Amino acid sequence: MLSFLTKDVPEAKSAGKLLKEQGFSFDFAYTSVLKRAIHTLWNVLDELEQQWLPVEKSWKLNERHYGALQGAE
């Protein structure tokens, strides 16, 4: 998680700031159950000033790795 805190927080906050500048606001948020995805969402919502937004967490949104098939066409 330390790598998330040092590397990805500024990027997530920047994305949230850009969404806000473009006039985006949301009624609901979805995220995987992975900690880094949840933390990314928190940082984006913080920049949007929408920390109160209802959030649905689902394992179905977790990233997957398909080994040798990864990136195959």
Image: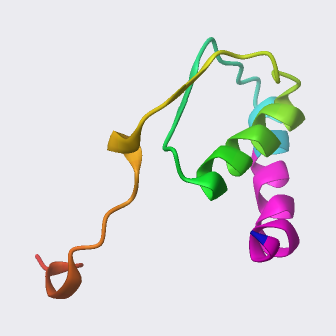
Viewer-closest of 57 and 46 = 57
Residue at 63% of width from left, 11% of height from top?
A: 27
Q: Main secondary structure of the magenta part?
A: helix
Q: Position of residue 1 (x, y in %)?
A: 74, 69
User: Where is 10 relative to 52, above or below?
Assistant: below
Query: Would residue 17 be found to the left or right of residue 42 on screen?
Result: right
In the rendered structure, does residue 55 fall within the stretch colored magenta? no
Q: Residue at x 70, y 50 (%)?
A: 40
The C terminus appears in which quarter of the rendering? Answer: bottom left
Q: Quadrant of residue 69?
A: bottom left
Tell me where residue 11 appears, x and y as whole percent.
78, 61
Q: Residue at x 63, y 53 (%)?
A: 35
Confirm whether the magenta stretch covers residue 11. yes
Within the image, what quadrant is residue 49 found in?
Answer: top right
Task: Give, as a single range, the part of the protein colored magenta.
Answer: 2-15
Outermost residue on the bottom side: it is 68
Q: Quadrant of residue 46?
A: top right
Which residue: 31% across, 64% down?
64
Residue 61 position in % (x across, y down): 39, 44
Does 20 appear above or below 17?
above
